[in-house]
Image: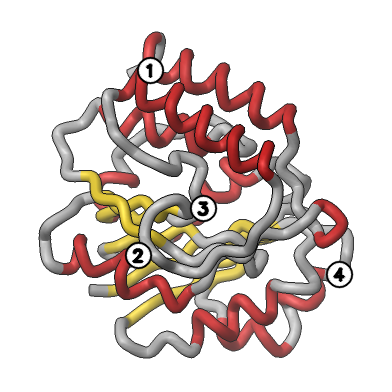
Amino acid sequence: MKVSIIIPCYNEIKTIQKIIEKIDQEKSYDKEIIVIDDFSTDGSRELLKSEISKKISKLILNEKNFGKGYSVRRGIIEATGSIILIQDADLEYDPTDYPKLIEPIKNDKADVVFGSRFIGSEEKRVLFFWHSLGNKILTLFSNMFTNLNLTDMENCYKVFKSEIIKNIILKENRFGFEPEITAKISKKNIRIFEVGVKYYGRKYAEGKKITWKDGISAIRCIVFYNLFSE
């Protein structure tokens, strides 16, 4: 099975090269690395076009800053693997978790796999209480609409059989991608698994971008995509 790894990138010059190198070190499966630069202004774009471009299968350059959801959609269109995995461009999530994320699909036990920061015994950096609580509240709210028992709906790691994700019409351009895709896969007759993953969260001074405004948007997306969208 070939795994298409989609990496949306916006102003991640401190981490983008390291994350690509870590992914490149994973040799246990055939893979393609698709990076979508979302009009970075910190030098990330220039870095991606330099020496590390040799480790990238496809580099997509957005003509303006659209957001994570838009970038993921572009990556999905370009993906040729039978499995599609979403990876953030920072170092909060560790590619050494790929085998456990891919295994349920590879063994035909699952069609979609979510990572979770809140289950398992994997190492996690201790950070913001309110941020963690907000994630759990959004997951609970999402579960009430989807009737899923996820523990971490907002987790970066989401892995799909290609034919499933390519047949879902996605609309959200920013971080609303997470609740939108969760709502839409919950309406399909598919097998969804969840596995614990390592988490090395960042502080805002270290480059974290998601804010309380994205939390408000997530609530809107949960309601809309569960009640008023196919």
The residue wearing badge 1 is 226
With 22 as the anchor, is 66 left or right in this view? right
Label 2 to label 1: alpha-carbon separation: 29 Å
What x and y, as percent, mark residue 210? Answer: 71, 42
The answer to which quarter of the image holds residue 153 is top left
Residue 184 visible in the snapshot: yes
Label 2 environment density (alpha carbons within 10 Å; few <14, some 14–19, many ≥20): some
Q: Mark 4 points at which residue?
A: 43
> Going 38% across and 72% down the picture, which residue do you hit?
98
Three-letter residue code for mark 1: Asn
Tag 2 and tag 1, C-beta contact below 8 Å: no
Q: Is residue 33 above or below residue 222?
A: below
Position of residue 97 measured from the top left corner of the image (x, y, whole percent): 41, 72
Residue nearer the viewer, 132 or 138:
132
Q: Distance between the residues labelled 4 and 3?
A: 24 Å
Label drawn at residue 156: 3
Which amino acid does the dot numbered 4 rest on? Gly
Of marks 4 and 2, which one's residue comes earlier in the chain? 4
Q: What element carries label 4?
A: loop
Label 3: state its secondary structure: loop
Residue picked out by circle 2: 80
